[in-house]
Amino acid sequence: MSCSVCPRNCKSRQSGFCGVGENIIVGRIAPHMWEEPVISGKNGSGTVFFSGCNLRCVFCQNRVISKELVGKAVSPEELNDKICHMIESGVHNINFVTPTHYASFLADFLSRYHYPVPIVYNCSGYESVSSLEALRGKVDIFLPDFKYSDDAPAVRYSSAPHYVHTARMALEKMYELVGDTVFDSNGMLTKGIIVRHLMLPGHIENTLGVIDMFEEFSRHKKVLFSLMSQYTPCGDMSAFDTLNRKLTAQEYDKALGYLELLGIDGFCQELSSAAQIYIPPFGNQL
């Protein structure tokens, strides 16, 4: 059976790009403190890290689950039990991380199970509009990482043709589904969009291009931007010289300066966040 849950439209789910087949594989279920402050708050975001990915970028920091598929197959009932346990612990939301290849499953799952906290869809931006439509009324917050402003690096690093157009259409759909940002009395995000961008070393023009796209998209909309500087080389990056280092202070400052120039509101990670100690442990938190 072919799979059209993401833009790749793989001929077979069993041999598809994401690599997971029919199983629901989870690499980590646990409160997470390192999202944006309006997501993690004081008690953490209740993250569900899915294994597999429809991008599998060469620089992925979560490659243990995205490529090696470390994790455990779970049933909907078991997943619901784990989510309820996190909610009882006080997490501010339930945060599905790398969910794209499980979008159809989540549409059914969130029709069956309902939770008293916001639902977060934390993705790469390489989404199918039809799959997003199936999530209407089921997701409260979208956290797409808009990775590229040019298709050349998208193809080279993520094997993702037409990434820019695809991500832009997905972003428009996300806004249609959830609208402007809404906060509760404690300043926690309860509805809306935060567009993330992971800066890549040696690709400052890509970052500036993404910022330009966001500025155009966000006119007359209440949406937030999150500039992420956490990139650190993981695995063998010898074939990609420009990616085989961390960001420089000059690259970081140029991006920050451009955000300030355009008056874009949101969040910026500090350069000190580029460390492997911030990569969550996977496979042992189920």
Image (cartoon, grey):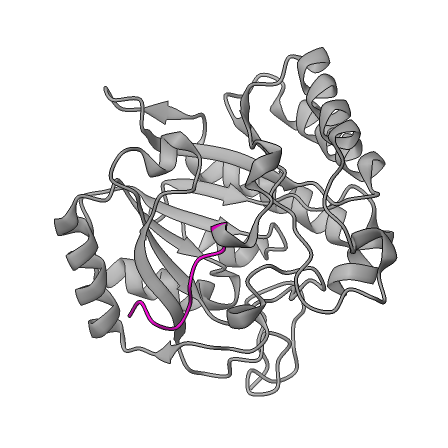
Query: Do we see residue 161 in this rendering?
Result: no
* Quadrant that contains the N terminus: bottom right
- Residue 214 sits in which quadrant? top right
Name the spot of residue 22 as percent of width and height, x first.
45, 83
- Compared across the picture, whether 116 is left or right of 252 comes to left
Q: Main secondary structure of the magenta part?
A: loop
> Which of the two residues, 101 or 135, is positioned nearer the viewer here?
101
- In terms of depth relative to the viewer, which is nearer, 225 or 10? 225
Quarter of the C terminus within the rendering: bottom left
Residue at x-position 12% and y-position 50%: 88
In the rendered view, tell whether residue 103 sits above or below residue 269.
below
Quadrant housing residue 37: top left
Residue at the spot x=65%, y=77% of the render? 10
Query: Relative to residue 65, is residue 231 drawn left or right?
Result: right
Residue 253 x %, y %: 73, 24
Q: Is residue 63 left or right of residue 81?
A: right
Q: Does residue 65 show up magenta in the picture?
A: no
Tell which residue pokes out farthest to the left in this image: 88
Q: Nearer the viewer, residue 63 or 52?
A: 63
Q: Position of residue 106 (x, y in %)?
A: 37, 62
Camera-side residue of 111 and 190: 190
**Residue at position x 67%, y 42% in the image:** 168
Q: Is residue 282 magenta?
A: yes
What span is colored magenta in the figure? 278-286
Check the image and report above or below for 226 versus 87. Answer: above
How many numbered marks appear?
0
- Residue depicted at 23% across the width and 44% down the height: 91
